[in-house]
Amino acid sequence: MKKILISLAAAGVVLAGAAAFAQEGGNAAAPTEFPIKKPKEMSWSFSGPFGTYDKAQLQRGLKVYKEVCSACHSMNLVAFRTLEDLGYSEAQVKALAAGYQIHDGPNDDGEMFDRPGIPSDHFPAPFANEQAAAASNGGAAPPDMSLLAKARGIERGFPQFIFDIFTQYATGGPDYIHSLLTGYNEQPPAGLQVPEGTHYNPYFDAGVSLKMPPPLSDGQVTYDDGAPQTVEQYSQDVSAFLMWAAEPHLEDRKKTGFRVMVFLLLFGALMYLTKRKVWANVAH
């Protein structure tokens, strides 16, 4: 219930779909749990125990965030200087940060002021405060995207979660974001009433529809590397970028985990051989 309430506050969703469906004479076997469809499991470069980030994809995802998502969504926990991990030089990061106006202060006169961004600054929010964000978006403030890829994701029931332990499945957030962004073109089941002013999306995890309209369209963002300029590609790129934003040290964590496992295996083998050596001439 807590998760649903948080999603309601963040996305401004209307949870009247199931009741309306029944009132309209819909099929009794129609889905009443959300999401109506499970997110599609994608093949990400960073999935699995040896996965790594594709820096070209992360740079494209940053471009999608800057030109589309940042109009409504903040990313308060991500500093400009961390973008060097995406393959940008120090000069490029400084130039990118300087393109933003940071509200700072007070100065010596006790007044707030605006200044160009510097690498140590974080991405500024598009609205002055949460109340202003909610007022501009139908009464609900869009969620911050800093940790969205780790905060979102659908629970995978038994026995799937058992298999996930061995496959190291940890990309439920990117899978969910990608499916949500590409799920707007699907039509609601017959008899399912979508509240006015909202948009049906079978992958939304807190209701039958949400207030956010389809944010992406083909050709909306221009890529410089020749990658397809389609909704499918945009959604994959920005999902990967949000995964990096939520877990920038993923590659280091996996490398450390692999070294620890190798050490434990070697240590276990040495302990076994030592035990055999010590007790070899002892009568049992």
Image: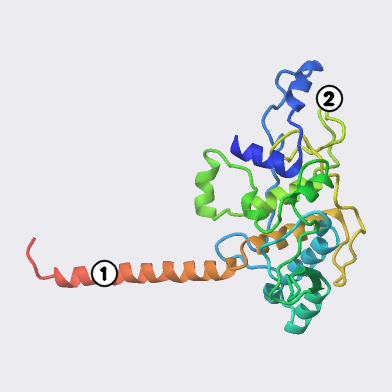
Q: Position of residue 153 (x, y in %)?
A: 64, 47
Amino acid type, label 2: Ala
Find residue 73 and report its image quarter: bottom right
Disc sitting over residue 190 in the figure: 2
Give the residue at x 68% y 56%: 43
Along the viewing direction, whichever of 68 and 168 lies nearer the viewer: 68
Decide which of 98, 1 is in the foreground and name it.
98
Residue 151 image position (x, y, % from top left): 62, 50
**How far separated are the C-alphas under marks 2 and 1?**
65 Å
Residue positioned 76% across, 74% down in the render: 109
Instruction: Indicate how the structure is coloured in the image.
Output: rainbow
Q: Residue furthest bottom?
A: 91
Label number found at residue 239: none
Which of the two discs, 2 and 1, sits closer to the camera?
2
The percent position of residue 122, horizontal first and vertical second, equals 71, 68
Q: Which of 2/35 is in front? A: 2
Left or right of residue 270, residue 221 in this image:
right
Q: Quadrant of the C terminus?
A: bottom left
